[in-house]
Image (cartoon, rainbow, N blue to C red):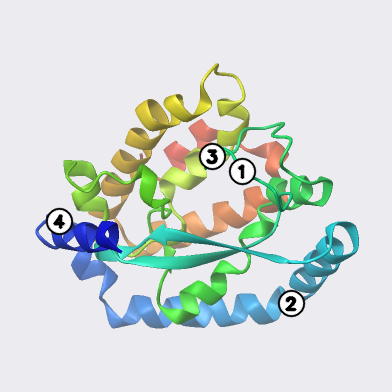
Amino acid sequence: MQRAKKLVIVASGGRRIGEKTADRPFLRCFDVLVALVAVVGLSPLFLISSLAILLADGRPIFFRQTRVGRHGQPFNIWKFRTMELANGGPAITSAGDRRVTTVGAKLRKYKLDELPQFFCVLRGHMSLIGPRPEVPEYVEPTDDLWEAVLQMRPGITDLASLAFRDEEEMLALVQDPETHYRSSVLPEKLRLNIAYQRSRSLTRDLKLLWMTARYSFHPQGFDRDRVMKALGA
């Protein structure tokens, strides 16, 4: 709890990058409308994913974890469970991680494990587009980049998460994945978070959502350079 209070205090004095955009009533209405359509339209995938986990791995079906949200406020993020119950270890996951179940590997490949986060959007903890929320241990609120990012409502997708869609495969190639994530991957993600927010527009948002859906259903066609060029990064 003290950690959470510290995050709130530090973040509240940071820069206001993206705060006005995040508060626009239109964007909140857009988030809610799309989330409702997604929950209804993708309900077969919700059902299939739930049954696959239940039959192959048993309960629980969902995974809950504390993440750091806007202004440093902690909240619970929900996903479909993709790991064994006794899944102690690093907070990040590399390709080939033995903690990931057979069903979980399929869900992660097509990002189906992220579907329950549409309910986080409906509750107001997340947005459709925004920086991916991190676990508290990775957040450094006194860092300038983090001060700026914590002004934004976290999202299901954004430029950084799309650009690093193959992050697990990248981390599997280095000797110390957690150190590499902290020192190289995470700072670059934060930079992309801020860069996208500064030049954000409805057209770019729609293009980002389309490309996120496209590479979720067709991950083999992922091309980072194409993504960066298409979104003007």
- Farthest residue to the left: give it: 13
Q: Element type at marker 2?
A: helix
Horizontal arrangement in the rendering, residue 170 relative to residue 138 (left or right): right
Q: Which residue type carries mark 4?
A: Val
User: Of circles 3 and 1, which is in front?
Assistant: 1
Q: Element type at marker 1?
A: loop
Residue 47 x, y percent position in the rendering: 80, 73
User: Of circles 4 and 1, which is in front?
Assistant: 1
Residue 98 x, y percent position in the rendering: 74, 35
Contact? badges 3 and 1 (CB < 8 Å): no
Upstream in sequence: badge 1 or badge 2: 2
How far apart are labels 2 and 4 at the CA level? 40 Å
Q: In this figure, which residue is indicated by the disc labeled 4?
A: 10
What residue is rendered at 79% in x and 68% in y? 50
Q: Element type at marker 3?
A: loop
Q: In this figure, which residue is indicated by the disc labeled 1?
A: 88
Horizontal arrangement in the rendering, residue 198 relative to residue 112 (left or right): left
Q: Nearer the viewer, residue 170 or 233?
A: 170
Q: In this figure, which residue is indicated by the disc labeled 3?
A: 92
The quarter of the rendered structure image containing the N terminus is: bottom left
Residue 38 x, y percent position in the rendering: 62, 75
Q: Which residue type carries mark 2?
A: Ser
Q: Nearer the viewer, residue 214 or 122?
A: 122
Q: Which residue type carries mark 3?
A: Ile
How far apart are labels 3 and 2 at the CA level? 28 Å
Regarding residue 65, the answer to whether it shows in the image is yes
Q: In this figure, which residue is indicated by the disc labeled 2?
A: 43
